[in-house]
Image (tube, rainbow, N blue to C red):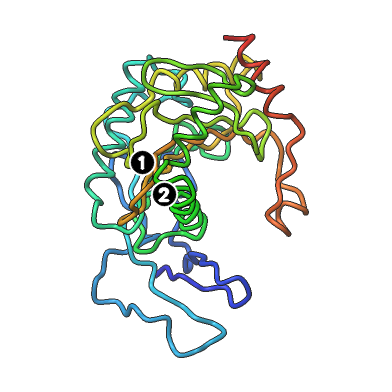
Amino acid sequence: MSEIRIDPLSGLRVIVVAGDALAPAHAGPAGPADSADPILTGDADLPSDPGEDPLFAVLPARGGHEHIGGDRPPVASLADLSVAQVQEELERWRERMRAHDAAAYVHVCAEEGPAAGAPLRVELFALDFVPAAIARERERFSAHAVRTMGANLLEDVVQEEVRRRERIVAIDDEAVLWCPYASGHPFQMMLAPRRRRERFQDDGPTGAALVHRALTLLRERCCASPPLSLWIRTAPRGAERFCWRIDIVPRLAAAGSLELGTGLHVNTVAPERAAAELRTLA
């Protein structure tokens, strides 16, 4: 059985998988649509308190975990699909997210490259808690709304990025694609809707065309599709102010000791330079 351990120093949570629970499904290529791995469990009878040990608190890893595949062709990258097929893929993600609306947070992520195992791997994790990074973003959205009399943080960021044009890669009728101001990785990109929407799983634009363009540009820039991670950031349950986005992070270099030891990223390609190169390719 998997469990969530709470670090006594940082308070952060870690999912620890007992034994060989991840073999072979998690270690190899993605399985059929909606197949389950034993990382998270939906057992409501498991205890919900962290135990009596103040230093080594542990919780059951409660939630849902599935692969999302459907009838998608066996491709190594979303860039191998047409724009219409990427739209279908994102709608499939949206449908599976809706099926877990009761979760505190739903995280959908795609892995491309040798580390994921071909073909493209897409997974959904439905958590019964809000991870610290998302909780911090939720707090910053709320603080920005208070400071600005109700404005939305990501909406304001998008508007300012469009005004400055320094880090914009592409814009269409649905979304904006740019290299974030504080990108932690070379050629990292972010996509957000042109008009604020809290939850990705709700009806509305998906940004499929710009997702496809982003991955095509990375393929052209790197002469092949690079290993990358892509995920949906959507509003946690109960968040009053938020805006969904899609993060695209090429894994062009391994994490170093500074990043692993402090969480401080070192990016060797400034986002302004990365955006300029990608715009030239476009």
Give above or below for 137 relative to 168: below
Q: Position of residue 142 (x, y in %)?
A: 43, 53
Give above or below for 199 relative to 23: above
Task: Tell me the amino acid under the disc marked 1.
Answer: Gly
Q: Residue at x 61, y 70 (%)?
A: 10
- The disc, 1 or 2, on the residue closer to the chain's N-terminal end is 2
Neighbours of disc 2 within 10 Å: few (<14), some (14-19), many (20+): some
Furthest toward the front, the residue is 149
Q: Is residue 250 left or right of residue 27?
A: right
Which circle marks residue 56 in the picture? none
Q: Residue at x 33, y 59 (%)?
A: 104
Q: Position of residue 199 (x, y in %)?
A: 32, 41
Q: Is residue 68 left or right of residue 251?
A: left
Question: How far apart in space, not on screen, are marks 1 and 2 (Cα)?
Answer: 7 Å
Residues under numbered marks 1 and 2 in contact, where contact means CB atoms less than 8 Å apart = yes
Mark 1 sits on what residue? 31
Mark 2 sits on what residue? 25
Q: Position of residue 88 (x, y in %)?
A: 29, 24
Q: Secondary structure at mark 1?
A: loop
Q: Nearer the viewer, residue 127 or 153?
A: 153
Task: Tell me the amino acid under the disc marked 2.
Answer: Ala
The quarter of the picture where the N terminus appears is: bottom left
Q: Secondary structure at mark 2?
A: loop
Q: Residue at x 30, y 57 (%)?
A: 238
Q: Nearer the viewer, residue 4 or 173?
A: 173
Q: Residue at x 51, y 56 (%)?
A: 136
